[in-house]
Amino acid sequence: MSRRMVEWSIALVLGLQAPRAVAQQEAPSPAPDEEAPPPTPEPGPTVLGVVDDLVVVGTEKTLPETVQAYARLDPGDTLTSEELPRVERRLVATGLFQSVKVSTQPTGEGHVRVVLAVEDKASWVVAPTFSVSNSNIGGGVLYAESNLWGRSKKFAAALQVSTAESGLFVGFLDPNLFGFPQVRLTFEGQARSDRVEEYRPDASQPVPEVVRRTRLNSASAASELSVMIAERVRVGAKYRVMLIDAQPPSQDTPVTAPAFEPGPVQRDASLRLVVGVDTRQNLQAIMEGLNIEGSLELSNPGVWSDFRYKRFGLLYRHGIRFFEEHNLVLRGEAVAGTELPFHQELVAGASSLRGFLYRQFRGDTRLSFTAEYHFPLFTIRSLSFRGVGFSDTGMLMWRSLPADLQLRDVKGRVVRGYLPDAKSGLDGATVAQGVGVGLRLFLRSVVLPLVGVDVAYGVNSGEIRFYVVAGVSPS
């Protein structure tokens, strides 16, 4: 049930209860031989009839059976007035359609035909991508198809070159496996080269100092299978294999000891398990619903890895709709890792902590909270301009560091050499906050968020930083 429906329900209950209480006080008690009138039953949903069949009209690419699968309505089901808007929301939330209208036609006494009238979006795009922040500038090209074969399968391939990371990404998502929207399957692979910069751990620096610069090359493949139970509970498992090639650090920085010991390529494999409640729906540019989930990621020789680490996570996301087109989006996260190698450490900055540099802060424990308020500005045909105000807060720390500031893998190789001034515990924690405003452009007719622009003020440093993203993220 949406927040608006809850508010209306509360208002209705309060509006009915108060007069009823007064009436109970003022009305005379019935005579002993009189029977009190039976209570008036609460109104319930209207039964529209038994579904005889479903008819899909208006679609040009999406197959009728795909539309019917997402409607989650079958012949023989009893249809109520409450179910019609639910079916409509399910179809809108797929992101495949510009417009959706669900209606019924009588086919006999107590029987109806359900008409699913939809209009397809343009499902594929070849587009340039471009991103700008104070510490990472780059761009590339993306091909994305969101409705392969008319069955809602999704494929993306992207090439990106930037100052911090460059590479090739390929991904496939089946959100409707074997015709069941409750089951999702993904495959993804990437090859990338990262220039990882470590900064002096002080959030108040106007110009953060780079202490060490390391080049990491990697290639990875992963697959995830998840199941949605009763449209609320999601259970998933993801297996990933990655090859890591660490290069010697740059010699023009203050610290030249390696953050990751160079040598033979290392294999990092992990198994990640997720369980949680997820009622979110993306309705055009509005996100509604609640997501709370816990995760556990394991890497050890038992899953074919050269590393041994664990990562625990708790995630909270909540979208609340106001005044039809206004949207409050909240996101909180708590993550803790043990024996994380350099390439798996938790980071924050730029898109994850606006007002600061890309991956400016690092640690094995992270707490973060983001609040965004999205609101409409104006619309030109199918192009929507929306504003956003935001606040990002994050804390990163190392809970416990080795005495010699070196973490080794199962073979004794150094997989994390910490900076000389690294501190563990709350004394070494970094707490940072950024606030700002932004602009978002959405095109209703295609599956493509066009442009995002943010201006953020770093409360700790007093610096103002700009972030621009054009195109879509391949992930």
Image (spheres, helix red, strand yellow):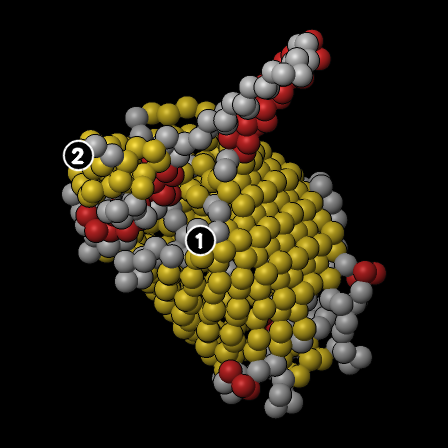
Task: Return the mark for residue 230.
Answer: 1
Q: Identify the amino acid type marked 2.
A: Thr
- Residue in the picture at 80% in, 79% down: 403
Task: Return the mark for residue 107.
Answer: 2
- The image shows residue 316 at horizontal and vertical percentages of 59, 50
| Number of marks present in the image shown | 2
- The image shows residue 163 at horizontal and vertical percentages of 49, 59
Relative to 199, 321 lies left or right = left
How many C-alpha atoms fall within 10 Å of the one at disc 2: few (<14), some, or many (≥20)?
Answer: some
Instruction: Report if residue 22 is visible in the image.
Output: no
In the structure shown, which secondary structural element does the residue marked by tag 2 occupy? strand
- The image shows residue 408 at horizontal and vertical percentages of 66, 84
> Disc 2 or disc 1, which is closer to the eye?
2
- Residue in the picture at 79% in, 67% down: 424
Q: Name the quadrant containing residue 118.
A: top left
In the structure shown, which secondary structural element does the residue marked by tag 1 occupy? loop
Mark before the other along the chain sequence, 2 or 1: 2
- Residue in the picture at 62% in, 62% down: 313
Q: Quadrant of the C terminus?
A: bottom left
- The image shows residue 191 at horizontal and vertical percentages of 41, 70
| Nearer-the-camera pick, 225 or 427 | 225
Instruction: Report if residue 81 is visible in the image.
Output: yes
